[in-house]
Image (cartoon, coloured by chain):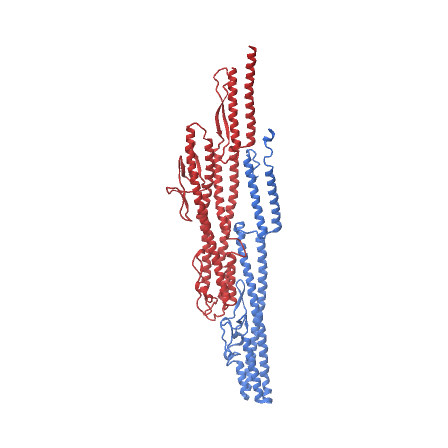
Amino acid sequence: MSSVNATAISYTPTDIANQMMGNINTQQSLQASLEEQLSSGTQINSPSDNPAGAASVLRLSSSIARATQYQANATDGLGWLSLGDSTMNSIVSTLQSVQQSAESITGTALTGGSVALHAVAAQITGASQQLLSLANTTYNGQAIFAGTGNVTQAYDANGNYVGGGSAPTRTVGPGTQVPIAVTGTAVFGTGSTGLLGPGGALAQLVSDINTGTPASLEAATTTDLTAVNTALTQVETQAGTLGSSYQQMQAFSLQATATSTALQTQMSGTDGTNVAQVSTELTQAQQTYQSGLWAISQLQQDSLVQYLQ
Amino acid sequence: MGNMALTIASSGIDAQQAAMDTVAENLANANTPGYIQESPTLEAAGSFNELGAGAGVTTLGATQAVDGLLLVNNQQAVGALAQTSSLQQVLQTVQSAFPVSTSSGTASDLSAFWQSWDAVAQNPSSASDRTQVVDAAQNVATDLAASSTQIATSQANAQTQLGSLAATDNGLLSQVASLNTQIVVAQGSGSSPNALVDQQNQIMDQLAQDLGAVGTAQPNGTINVSVGGVKVVTGNTAATLSVAGTPGSLSLTTQTGTTVPATAGTAAGILAAVNQYLPAYQTQLDTVANNLATTVNTQLAAGYTATGATGQALFEGTGAANLTINTAVATNPQLLAASATATAATNNGANAQAMANLFDAASGPDQSYQSFIQNMGSQIAGVTSQVQTQTSVANAAQENLQAVSGVNSTNQEVLMLNYQQAYQASAQVISTVDTMIQSLLQAV
């Protein structure tokens, strides 16, 4: 009863009935709103429930979706990087075997002659084929050393680089991009200074060993071996780059998870129903509603007419 | 002298009888809308004799407890409440098309659209990921069109409601005019126009609620009715209202083409919704659609396809209702410009990634949508709180009016006792005078 204290006014039964009905309706709509909050689990179901809250629910929701996407991007990037890392290890060990073979030819030439030399050359050719296949390693159908220029392969069968562009990146935070690979040219070099392909260091080494002259064997163990050593250093440097990218990616992945958790907490603070509070309010509303009904049942029971019988 | 007492007592019985009639009438109409409490008008009759006590009581009729100010206050309060309530009803219907949900609706589909670009960025050559982008874009366009349709439907429904309101009120206006005629006739023939006034009163309450109509009492007992200063009932002539114009410039006009500026009542609420609120929402929704098209198409134009061709637009058309997907891109999603460079573009997803990062672009579609939702929510919350305030005001006005014009049954019962006792006393006077005359006759 909003203004019962204004006793000067004469209240007609119609007035009192209207007031009571109005109060009952108010309690009912309050109950309905509280029940909606409890059943939906959210405080804000229509924009007008809390206009600023509604906008921040939408904003938080889109930020959470983005944080989740950053996590997904990081997971994808970590897949690329760990495959890149293990591929690099294989490349290093293959190159080390080439190194050993090349260093062994001085003794081989003296004891086994040209047959033994050809065997060493064949060994190195095999290693070269293995390197080519490692260079064409794919993740999820995408060649990891091809940059952005080629989907399926980084090198053709002859060892020529067919990729292009720079290494792909993944976005793992607002404005933060981490490279998820290195390009074939960065790992293996190109042309005569490179490792693979016609005219590359390995092809030169094989050709010098096969030639078998003292001068060519001299070149094989000095110039050519130095080139292989240089290439190995370059591969190891790139492996280090991938390793640091991996660590960076892992850190950002954790950060994205933390961000997502913080946003979820904020969201449930903004939109989540405080069950304890709403349940208490609902109980109060139900009690008020029942008192209202009781008051109506008492309405004008004491009429003057009763005393006039 | 004895004769005089009998005459006086007889007039007393008549007067109490008439007074009892008003009690009966009041109690019978205790719950009749528009009914105004009556009370008997009694007057001591003048004496014809210098020594006489008087000539009893004259019954002049039944007077209505009218308080013009309270009546007008109540009608204004009812009109103002009806205005905001009807506005609230229309806006609530529109609002139901924009639930605040994190799992469905335009905002969530926009998120899904931006995320579909991440998939393309990760695997630019994947045909299925590109198709996902087209599908997600189609979802957003469909959402926007559906929301726009919902607003347009609410607008059309409100317009229909206004039309039927005008039709109903035309009937009421002509009733007021006809009652005006009857009141003049009743007064001319000397009978009481009270019942006619009660009826007119009830109709005026309805007209105040519908149109914010204001009645002006005339000296001859009739009322003239005006809406926003335009007379719609003058004496026995009533205007015929109709709805003119299109949403945005909808109005009520009389048969002569005069605009009736409803500033209160249900009609004013509907007009505000149809002419101001809903067009504004439509415009804001269009802004979201246009921002989406501009943001996405601009980013695409900055990129290249896998073959190095410049990117094509994904969205076509302007406005929420007309946003469509470029058919060429829909049939061949390879035309989506995922690459940031023209060369080495085959497996380049950098532009797709840049697109995905636009999810929170300043004045991008997401932000426009959020501010639209906030703006609509604030307006509806404001209207809802106005409805609450005006309900209290209307209740108070109703209480004040009822206190004067309403029937308080307890009061009537007390009056009934009064009248009953006076009636019995007058009857006792007659009986006593009779006894007096009897005793005189016996003595003679």
Residue depicted at x 62% and y 47%: A280
Residue depicted at x 49% and y 55%: B369
Image quarter where the C terminus of chain B lies is top right
- Whole-percent x and y of residue A233? 57, 76
- Whole-percent x and y of residue B10? 51, 20
Q: In this view, does A228 lie above or below B187?
A: below
Q: Is residue B364 visible?
A: no
Residue at the far top: name it.
B444
Residue depicted at x 48% and y 41%: B80
Observer-nearest residue: B226 or A93? B226
- Whole-percent x and y of residue A219? 54, 85
Place residue A4 in its image quadrant: top right
Say left or right for B164 vs A203: left
Task: Report the label total.
Answer: 0
Residue at the far front: name it.
B442
Residue at the far left: name it.
B256
Place residue B211 in its image quadrant: top left
Q: In this view, does A137 lie above or below B98?
A: below
Q: Indicate the chain coloured blue by its letter.
A: A
Q: Can residue A35 be seen in this view?
A: yes
Observer-nearest residue: B179 or A54? B179
Say left or right for B422 vs B163: right
Q: Indicate the chain coloured red by its letter.
A: B
- Whole-percent x and y of residue A148? 50, 70
